[in-house]
Image (cartoon, rainbow, N blue to C red):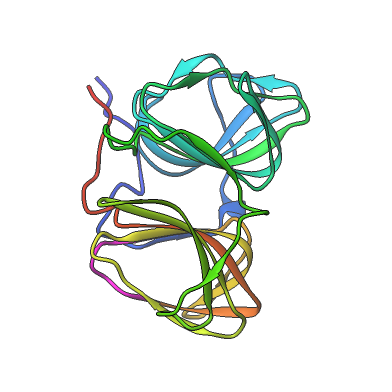
Amino acid sequence: MSSAMEINSQFDQPVLIHTDTLEWKASPMAGVERRMLDRIGDEVARATSIVRYAEGSTFSEHTHSGGEEFIVLEGVFQDEHGDYPAGTYVRNPIGTHHIPRSGPGCTIFVKLWQFDECDRDQFAVDLNAIDLVRDPKRPGVSAAILADRDYEHVAVEQWEPDINFDLEDKGGFEMLLLEGSLQHGREEFGRCDWIRWPAGKSASFQTGRDGARIWIKRGHLATIRLPCA
């Protein structure tokens, strides 16, 4: 019996990925490809990925046994509930289901099997229209909270240009760069690049001349939930 696929499955180690350098991998459905960022499992997996739908492609109907959240990065994602253009953030808790498709094609950032069983909130938010509020405790940061629970805090944040930030969370953090640029050490990260940082460890970043707009999740790496056998 083969072991389950594991990609960046050591959650006590930092992971920093220029996502456009990753190879697209075919999914079981024609026209749907993936760049795998982290993964434990095969087709049923705890996974973080960037997924690309070709024009007119569909994915089979399925139930979210472990929940799903995603951000539409390009194009328009569609299902029987509606159309979700670029900039939409969607949370589909455990037990929800849909038939994904995209007429014009789209690219999404998606996380699977990372919902708490008690989290029943299903919603979609336009990140392009959301109001950001200045954070009084962090100069140079404006933010909007997307989800806030004991085990996770999810937000979209705007970081002003040419500012240094030190980040640390007892439950770890991960972030997807939506716009602008960040530098860590001598390495620069741009749009759609992804960073995951372990619980209890700090990291330093500097924003570029245009600042940075990020989706960031904190606290959720303290306990790693895996798919049921």
- Can you see residue 94? yes
Image quadrant of residue 111?
top left
Question: Would you place residue 109 above or below residue 65 in this image?
Answer: below
- Can you see residue 35? no
Image quadrant of residue 12?
bottom left
Residue visible at 47% across and 16% down in the picture: 62
Q: Position of residue 218 (x, y in %)?
A: 35, 58
Which span is picked out in magenta?
Answer: 195-203
Image quadrant of residue 208?
bottom right
Residue visible at 57% across and 78% down in the picture: 207
Which quarter of the rendering shows the C terminus? top left
Q: Position of residue 60 (x, y in %)?
A: 55, 14
Question: Which residue is nearer to you in this view: 103 or 183?
Answer: 103
Q: 1 left or right of 33?
A: left
Question: Which residue is nearer to you in this view: 17 or 120?
Answer: 120
Residue 177 colored in magenta in the image: no
Q: Position of residue 1 (x, y in %)?
A: 24, 19
Q: 59 left or right of 45?
A: right
Question: Would you place residue 196 above or below residue 90 in this image?
Answer: below
